[in-house]
Image (cartoon, rainbow, N blue to C red):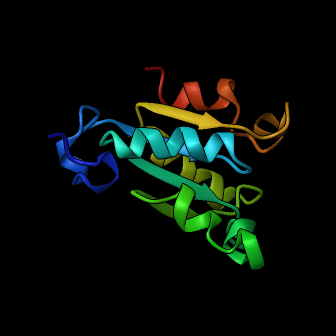
Amino acid sequence: MMADPGNLPNDAGPLNGVRVLEFCHAIMGPTAGLILADLGADVIKVEPADGDTTRRLIGFGAGFFPTFNRNKRSLAIDLKSDEGRDLLYRLVATADAVIENYAPGTMDRLGCGYAALSQKNPG
């Protein structure tokens, strides 16, 4: 009988050793990161400086954040500051993949689009 993937230790999955930076909100982005984390990837959710807004949902939405972000690590970074971008660039150098689901152009405006990040990690 196979173990529930949501209960596997992170080092037991087929993506063990893969680091993913996640810039996601809403449903589809966090779900993609969740699946990767459940498969053993080290998913680091990069949140805005004041935290992901889904942390503050109440009522029927109260369980959204813990449900869609299990097995992930989180880090709040102010990407509008030089210090925040420098921290992100150091993280990108250690990442295997970046996923995001912001509106088109948002990552570029923040200095975190493909052109900027691929200079920090060409792989």
Q: Residue furthest front?
A: 1
Quadrant including the C terminus? top left
Residue farthest along the left direction in this orientation: 1
Horizontal side of residue 39 vs 47, given as left or right: left
Q: Residue at left 56%, top 50%?
A: 88
Residue 80, image x and y in percent? 77, 57
| 116, above or below 29, in the image | above
Q: Nearer the viewer, residue 92 or 33?
A: 33
- Residue 87 in view here: no
Q: For the image shown, how many numbered marks are present on the structure?
A: 0
Q: In the image, residue 98 lies at what x, y percent? A: 54, 34
Q: Is residue 96 above or below residue 35?
A: above
Apparent side of residue 105 relative to residue 75 in the rendered image (left or right)? right
Residue 22 quadrant:
top right
* 35 shown above or below 104: below
In the displayed structure image, the side of residue 101 where residue 93 appears, left or right: left
Residue 50: x and y in percent read: 72, 73
At horizontal 24% and vertical 32% (from top left) the residue drawn is 14
- Can you tell which quarter of the image residue 35 is in? top left
Task: Between residue 57 and residue 47, name the one nearer to us.
Answer: 57
Q: Quadrant of residue 64?
A: bottom right
Task: Name the residue at 74% across, 40% down.
Answer: 111
Q: Is residue 78 visible?
A: yes
Q: Position of residue 71 (x, y in %)?
A: 39, 57
Q: Nearer the viewer, residue 3 or 103?
A: 3
* Quadrant location, the N terminus: top left
